[in-house]
Image (cartoon, rainbow, N blue to C red):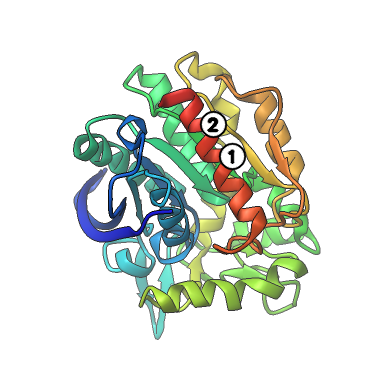
Amino acid sequence: MTDVTQAEFTFPVTYAEGTQTLRGTIYRPASSVAGAEALPPVVFNSGFTGGVSMYGQLMGRALAERGYTVTTYDVTGFFTNKAVRNTYRDGDLTVTNVSLEDQTTELLALIAWTRAECGRMPAVASWAMGSVASLAAITELARSGGEQVAFYVPMNYTRLSALQGLRADPAAADAALAALADDAAIPPFDTGTEATRLGYYPLDPATQAYVDDQLGSYTDAGGADRWPGCTHVSAKSYKSYVAFDPEAGLAAAGAGFPPALIIHGAENTLHMPAESVRLHEAYPGEKGDAALILDGMAHGQTMQPDSPVFQQMIAAIDGKIRARCA
């Protein structure tokens, strides 16, 4: 594998309220790699607290080692783009508004920047909640009839309404959260305690056991706020994300979807494998015979460069993109 270079860049994103400038990171092979000129660039996005400050750096380096140019970024309200938008003060608290609508807009802008920078449409690889935003983005491209991305790789996708089944009492939590003012501050996670029962994102015990140590190491290495990059989330974040369902609009969007490799961990106890199986059934583009359900892969526990499961996943992504796009 070749060495990798890393550089920061900025790209414009136009929201309903106007245009803002976001920071991104680009990874490239440090020396020429045979066949790399035939490869599309790759845009990587993650959700909730994700981006370059977490798995973006891992995926960027792993794919750049194989010859790809990879762009990634932190979603607004977090880490390197925390000050751009989606945070506000509530007394002594800093509250983060998590907006999948904004993330879709940001991802489309990063796709456009990467297209201009590299001269061809990128593939898009997305992690977990980021796969929901990227599904919305490629659906918008299909609906509009615009130039589509070269390839699509959602990893550990879930419909966000399904995620609520991890709560002790999903119906009661939903009713209580819906009754809050949009700007009310809630915990970022529901970890099964009374104090966190109205948290934004429910975490199962297996996920709780690894995320702080592993993801904290990534954000520490990136010089960003320690994971998760927020202390409180707006109630509006919950209300909007349970209603955000691009999967429901796939059939109406028509043709024009990119070929896809849909990946999920067989041992994932946070985002269930059945979610990617259902997405595979509903996805209107070329997608192979079945979702790739990887044995030994849970949620993010194997997202480490020396993990054989991670290496297997990267090899599968590389192989499918080369076969279809190179």
Spot occupied by residue 319 in the image (x, y as percentages of width and height): 54, 34
Q: Please name whichever residue, 325 or 256, is drawn nearer the observer in this view of the structure.
A: 325
Spot occupied by residue 273 in the image (x, y as percentages of width and height): 74, 44
Q: Please name whichever residue, 164 or 203, is drawn nearer the observer in this view of the structure.
A: 203
209 vs 139, left or right, is right
Q: Please name whichever residue, 262 or 182, is drawn nearer the observer in this view of the structure.
A: 262
Residue 254 marker: none
Which amino acid lies under the numbered mark 1 shown in the image of this protein? Ala
Name the residue beneath numbered marker 2: 320
Rendered residue at 40%/78% (across/down): 225
Which amino acid lies under the numbered mark 2 shown in the image of this protein? Lys
Q: Is residue 258 visible?
A: no
Spot occupied by residue 18 in the image (x, y as percentages of width and height): 19, 47
Q: Please name whichever residue, 232 or 155, is drawn nearer the observer in this view of the structure.
A: 155
Rendered residue at 38%/54% (across/down): 2
Residue farthest to the right, as pictured: 168
How many angstroms separate mark 2 from mark 1 (CA)? 6 Å
Rendered residue at 43%/46% (across/down): 66
Residue farthest to the top, as pictured: 255
The image quarter containing residue 43 is top left
Quarter of the image that includes the C terminus:
top left
The image quarter containing residue 222 is bottom left
Q: Is residue 104 visible?
A: yes
Counting the numbered discs, the total is 2
- Tell me if residue 206 comes above or below residue 135 in the rendering: below
Dot 1: few (<14), some (14–19), or many (≥20) neighbours within 10 Å? some
**Which element type, helix, strand or loop, lies under badge 1?**
helix
Rendered residue at 72%/41% (across/down): 293
265 vs 47, left or right, is right
Name the residue beneath numbered marker 1: 316
> Badges 2 and 1: C-beta atoms under 8 Å apart?
yes
Spot occupied by residue 133 in the image (x, y as percentages of width and height): 48, 43
